[in-house]
Amino acid sequence: MSKGERDCCSGVRLEAITAEVVTQLAKYEATSTSWPWGEAKMLQSLSSEHHCYVLVEDKAIGYCVLLLIDEVLEILNFVIFSEFQGRGYGRLLVDKIKAVARDLGASMLWLEVRADNHRARKVYLSAEFSETGIRKNYYPNLTGSHTKSPQDAVLMQCALEISS
């Protein structure tokens, strides 16, 4: 991360998502990714056993949805909103997720990412994730065309040191 990226991230905090901000987050997400979760799925996550957090500075930067199963924390959704992409916030959110995972007693982080999402894969690899497998044809194609094949998912994991 460059000096400018570190400077942009001071004062950034992770807050629990509340139902009151879901509409706003869904709007930001819709302009930031080709496959947004939308309000209904976000609200469903809030009412389940998911851990939902928004990365905030002066305004929302991105969000994540996490699920703890035994000692594994799975990243179900991870979004940095368009205007903040490429500025170090993705790596910052990964680091904050690692801290949450440790607080929850997780010893492993797990996720899947589109094979063609090279920027996200680079961020995860820089945060000590390993690519551990492929799920063939897991994601629908982005164009909606029936002639293009679905995208593979790359499985990634990161072992965490548990503080005693």
Image: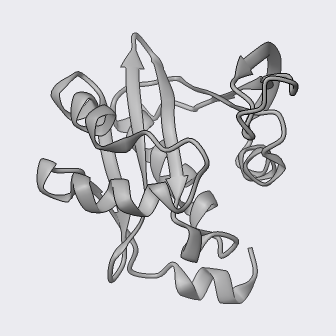
The outermost residue toward the front is 146
Query: Horizontal placement of 112 versus 143: left or right?
Result: left
Query: Horizontal placement of 127 versus 99: left or right?
Result: right
Could you tell me which residue is drawn at 33 percent across and 58 percent down?
25
Residue 65, placed above or below residue 147: below
The image quarter in which residue 161 lies: top right
Query: Horizontal placement of 107 versus 65: left or right?
Result: right
Could you tell me which residue is drawn at 75 percent across and 24 percent down?
153
Q: Position of residue 72 (x, y in %)?
A: 49, 18
Residue 98, placed above or below residue 83: above
Residue 63, placed above or below residue 85: above
Could you tell me which residue is drawn at 72 percent across and 49 percent down?
120
| Of residues 144 and 125, the one drawn nearer to the viewer in this rendering | 144
Which quarter of the rendering shows the N terminus? Answer: bottom right
Which quarter of the rendering shows the C terminus? Answer: top left
Could you tell me which residue is drawn at 58 percent across and 31 percent down?
160
Q: Position of residue 155 (x, y in %)?
A: 73, 22
| Of residues 155 and 6, the one drawn nearer to the viewer in this rendering | 155
